[in-house]
Image: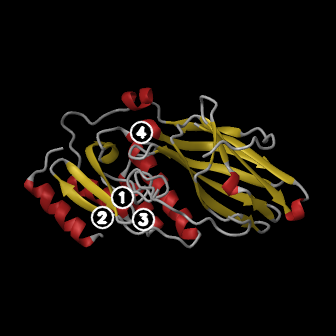
């Protein structure tokens, strides 16, 4: 992406004006931008060119989970390669690219991040990437540990975003567009679309507790798989989020490294959770257990992350 004088003026102007125990919420650690405010940090990665991230031992096999329903949509390498690219004559609007990056950097304001989705083509890499990071930010805000905004700077060929807490940065270049809407970009020279999962009806149920997969992203910078999901319940329940396990496509199982979300839910409530698994790749299965009041019944949930 070239940086004409007019684009730099727009970019600089916009940049200048933007920016445990059951029953207790997990305490987030690390960054997940490129997973959220921290670029490529699972629990603190921030979408966009350069975002500072705020990102297991083998776990004992858990109870046999209920069979999941639905399917997840993964942007595979083939799909990404087949995705329509801008016509040679179509250029990426400098203002839209800058506004997208500013939205990606607003980790302290999940709704502000989601506003940036209007700049993207639905179901595109740019859309799913921002949606994932906004979901991570929302889960942290819900548990009382909101992320800080990341910083964004224009570069000769794109942007550089950094997350203050993790001091991790990432570069965002080669933006693409279709019909005036952003479709994709590269993070540190790689296409994040190959590591994203946009869930479509993936869910599991057990004893009145429902789990819904929202998004998943295998960080380019930290190579950590970050999964976001929502849990709802009919009765009071204690979810064993710290005991969540992920079985990779090759069969290896590991316990969650970091969790954000409420462990204890009262009847007819919900929680958004974020779970990170270092070194794990998409295409496996996530298993989570729990108990209803006084452990009258065991909850066993499992669903695919692909």
Q: Position of residue 14 (x, y in %)?
A: 23, 66
Residue at disc 4, secondary structure = helix
Q: Which residue is mark 1?
A: 52
Quarter containing the C terminus? top right
Q: Label 1 neighbourhood size at 10 Å, few (<14), some (14-19), many (20+)?
A: many
Q: Earlier in the sequence, mark 1 or mark 3?
A: 1
In the displayed structure, does residue 61 sit left or right of residue 20? Answer: right
Mark 1 or mark 4: which comes first in sequence?
1
Q: Alpha-carbon distance for marks 1 and 2?
A: 8 Å
Please report the residue visible at 37 percent of the width from the left and 67 percent of the height from the top. Answer: 149
Q: Count the marks: how many? A: 4
Residue position marked by numbered label 3 in the rendering: 107
Where is mark 2, residue-wise? 151
Q: How far apart are the alpha carbons under marks 4 and 2? A: 23 Å
Q: Nearer the viewer, mark 1 or mark 4?
A: 1
In-front residue for pair 239/186: 239
Q: Check whether the beta carbons of the residues at disc 1 and disc 2 lie within 8 A of each other.
A: yes
Q: Is residue 34 left or right of residue 58?
A: left
Which of the two discs, 4 and 2, labels the residue nearer the N terminus? Answer: 2
Left-right relation of 148 to 26: left
> Element under label 2?
strand
Query: Residue 195, how many percent across, how many down?
Result: 46, 39
Q: Earlier in the sequence, mark 2 or mark 3?
A: 3
The mark closer to the camera, 4 or 2, is 2
Question: Which mark is on residue 193?
Answer: 4
């Amino acid at each position: 992406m070239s940086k004409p004088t007019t684009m730099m003026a727009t970019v600089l102007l916009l940049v200048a004006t933007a920016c445990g125990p059951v029953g207790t919420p997990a305490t987030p650690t690390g960054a997940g931008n490129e997973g959220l405010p921290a670029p490529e940090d699972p629990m603190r990665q921030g979408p966009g060119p350069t975002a500072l991230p705020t990102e297991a031992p083998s776990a004992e096999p858990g109870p046999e989970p209920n069979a999941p329903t639905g399917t997840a949509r993964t942007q595979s390498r083939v799909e990404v390669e087949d995705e329509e690219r801008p016509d040679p004559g179509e250029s990426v609007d400098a203002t839209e690219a800058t506004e997208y990056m500013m939205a990606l950097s607003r980790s302290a304001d999940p709704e502000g991040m989601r506003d940036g989705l209007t700049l993207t083509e639905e179901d595109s890499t740019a859309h799913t990437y921002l949606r994932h990071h906004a979901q991570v930010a929302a889960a942290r805000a819900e548990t009382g540990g909101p992320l800080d905004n990341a910083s964004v700077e224009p570069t000769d060929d794109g942007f550089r975003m950094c997350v203050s807490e993790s001091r991790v940065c990432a570069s965002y270049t080669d933006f693409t567009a279709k019909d005036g809407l952003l479709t994709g970009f590269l993070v540190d020279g790689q296409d994040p679309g190959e590591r994203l999962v946009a869930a479509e009806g993936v869910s599991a149920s057990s004893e009145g507790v429902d789990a819904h997969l929202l998004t998943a992203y295998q960080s380019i910078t930290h190579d950590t798989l970050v999964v976001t999901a929502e849990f709802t319940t009919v009765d009071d329940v204690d979810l064993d989020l710290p005991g969540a396990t992920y079985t990779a496509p090759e069969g290896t199982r590991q316990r969650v490294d970091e969790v954000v979300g409420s462990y204890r839910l009262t009847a007819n409530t919900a929680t958004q959770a974020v779970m990170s698994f270092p070194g794990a790749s998409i295409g496996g299965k996530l298993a989570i257990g729990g108990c209803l009041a006084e452990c009258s019944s065991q909850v066993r949930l499992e669903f695919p992350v692909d």
